[in-house]
Image (cartoon, rainbow, N blue to C red):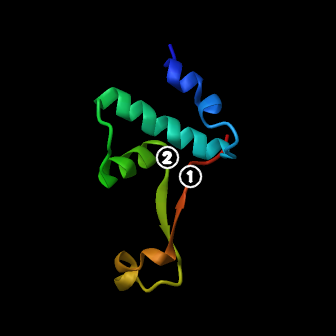
Amino acid sequence: MSHPREDRFDELFSGSEFTAEETEFFRAIDRYKRRTGRLFLSWHEVLRIARELGYRRVFDDETPRKRRHKQLSTCVLVGRPAG
């Protein structure tokens, strides 16, 4: 059974132009907050939610291996395959 607040997501944020992917992420954050009883999440928790949705970090192939872990600007976060 869905939560009444989740059912009203579009109504609560009318006028906002969120993509389906953004809406899915917001709803995942909201579900986590309700499940854990936490109002404010740490970045660790936000990253965990993104990973649970299938996101992962991919490095630019031109970045030297020894510096990859330091150059976050050369990384992109990609979603799970569509389908």
Measured from the top left, where is residue 62 in percent x and y?
Answer: 53, 84
| Residues packed near mark 2 inside 10 Å, few (<14), some (14 to 19) or many (20 plus) | few
Q: Residue furthest top?
A: 1
Q: Earlier in the sequence, mark 1 or mark 2?
A: 2
* Label pair 1/2, CB-CB below 8 angstroms: yes
Residue 64: quarter of image? bottom left
Write down the residue under mark 2.
54
Kindly report the distance in space between the C-alpha atoms of the residues bearing marks 1 and 2.
6 Å
Viewer-side residue, 27 vs 54? 27
In the rendered structure, find residue 67 and report the number of the disc placed on it. Answer: none
Count the marks.
Answer: 2
Residue 70: quarter of image? bottom left
Please tell me which residue is depicted at 67% across the width and 36% down the height of the picture.
14
Q: Inspect the image, locate mark 2, and give the three-letter code of the amino acid beneath it.
A: Gly
Measured from the top left, where is residue 41 in percent x and y?
Answer: 32, 45
Label 2: which secondary element: loop
Measured from the top left, where is residue 37 in percent x and y?
Answer: 29, 29
Q: Is residue 42 above or below residue 4?
A: below
Please tell me which residue is depicted at 52% across the width and 18% down the height of the picture.
4
Write down the residue under mark 1.
79
Q: Is residue 4 left or right of residue 46?
A: right
Q: Inspect the image, locate mark 1, and give the three-letter code of the amino acid beneath it.
A: Gly
Viewer-side residue, 80 vs 28? 28
- Quarter of the image containing the C terminus? top right
Q: Is residue 48 above or below residue 9?
A: below
| Residues packed near mark 1 inside 10 Å, few (<14), some (14 to 19) or many (20 plus) | some
Label 1: which secondary element: loop
Please tell me which residue is depicted at 64% across the width and 32% down the height of the picture.
10
